[in-house]
Image: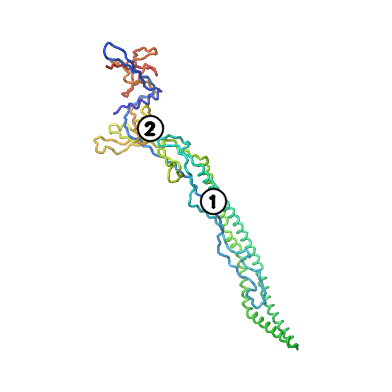
Amino acid sequence: MKMIIAGTTALVIAGGALFGYNVYQKSSQSNAAEIAKEVTVSRGNVTAGVTESASVNVDSLEQTYDLVLTSTSVSASVESGSSSPSGGMSMGGGMSGMGGMSMGGMTNGKSSRGGSIGSTSVSTQSESSAVALVVDKVMITEGQSVKKGDVIMTITQESINEARDSLQKAVEDAELALRQAQIEASETKLSAKFDYDTRIAEGQNALSVYNATLNEIAQNISSLYSQIDDVNSQIATCTDEKQLSQLQTQLESLRSQLSSAESSRSSDELSARQTYEEACMYYENAQDLYDVSVNGVGASEEEAQEAVDAAKADLEAFEAYISDGNICADYSGTITGVGYSSGDTLSSETAIASYADAESITVTVNVTEDDISVVHLKDTVDISFLSYPDEMFSGYVSEIGSSSTSGNSSTVSYPVTVVVTSVPETLLSGMTANVTFISKQVENVLYASNKAIIREGTDSYVLLKKQDGSEEKVKVEVGFSNGNIVEVKGVSEGDTLLIKGKVS
């Protein structure tokens, strides 16, 4: 068992005093000189336990550059779909024998504005080059202690302005695309409504138009017969040869028209019937065709609005992150790495800085099988560091290994991991730590150095230095000792005790 000295330091700190000494000499008739060392009576804890040493392990925290600053272009476009069947109800295009007469006006399913079914889409495209933020000054170095919120780097104003301009342009482009999408969506709805109204009107008039077409076909043929009869009557009474020749020519033309009209009558009537039926079909399906035409219009507007929201969010995130040109520490702790120097461009692939994680500092020591019985999970331990010899810190046992680490040695030891809960201002991986596992402790007592106790038989005394510099031998009662300091009663906190000796 190793009785600790490290615990003593903790108690001195708790009592608010450090051991000090003054050495002075008194002349004697011999060559030996008497010296007196002064120690102070303090209040605190007297602790004994097992002390082992090992290196500190400090986990690392990384502060990354996670602000996406890619210049984005946004545009809106109309994607054309398949055109709705027109029906082709032009009442005269196929009636070659009707003297050029047209029954038009009935398009049956396709207005003069067009019957194509289309939708508006918004496309977002990122430019190949990312916005670059350039480091101006680096305010930290490895080993430096910082607090959360401290400025650790600054960014050049020029690169900030370029980034801001790019992000503002992205917002403007997205808003323009949204307006374009809204306009095109409105036009699509208006066109679809116009086509719908046209199909309804043509469907409602389909029968009367069909009957009128059949009547015109019959009237055209009847009119040709009447004209032929009239010309024949004129020929029968005509005596002028020149006029007679003109009448015969006219007669041949009428007969040709009649022949053509009679030949195409069946096909013209069939065409009129087909157009009528198509008009009825479009009338019955007018609502469905309208729904297809406007399908997806709202989705395109939503997509454009999302692009606007995303662009504005990027700009707001940028302003919150770097508007003042400063990058601040995300954590408190000791800097263990710096990723940039002046003139470098920030990248998400390189950490801005790394920190010693004050929440994840551990020490793993090997405790022999003779001492392992005093170690328990969650036990509080005292910790001192070689770099801070006059200070004491605390921790607790987080893990006790079940496998020994003896290797080829005859001494069997077990790994014990301690989490450090109070740390000095700067603590780096690899520093040496002394961990004391407490086996016994008395708390809030007066204590003094073991060397200050003068033992005479069963009684104990101390040499008390008075305010006038004189000495007084005072009987005291001693209690628990850890081998370095001892609990003492009969003196007061702050009293100065003398430890005398002779040197030659």
Up/down of 481 relative to 316, above or below = above
Task: Give SS at disc 2.
Answer: strand
Q: Which residue does the numbered mark 2 point to in the structure image?
A: 395
Name the mark nearer the viewer: 1 or 2: 1
Q: Which mark is residue 415?
A: none
Residue at 62% over, 61% down: 191
Image quadrant where one finds the C terminus: top left
Label 1 sits on what residue type?
Ala
Left or right: 289 in relation to 409:
right
Q: Is residue 383 visible?
A: no
Q: Which residue does the numbered mark 1 point to in the structure image?
A: 307
Image quadrant where one finds the N terminus: top left
Label 2 sits on what residue type?
Gly
Q: Identify the mark nearer the N-term, 1 or 2.
A: 1
Q: Quadrant of residue 342?
A: top left
Residue placed most toward the observer, 171 or 396: 171
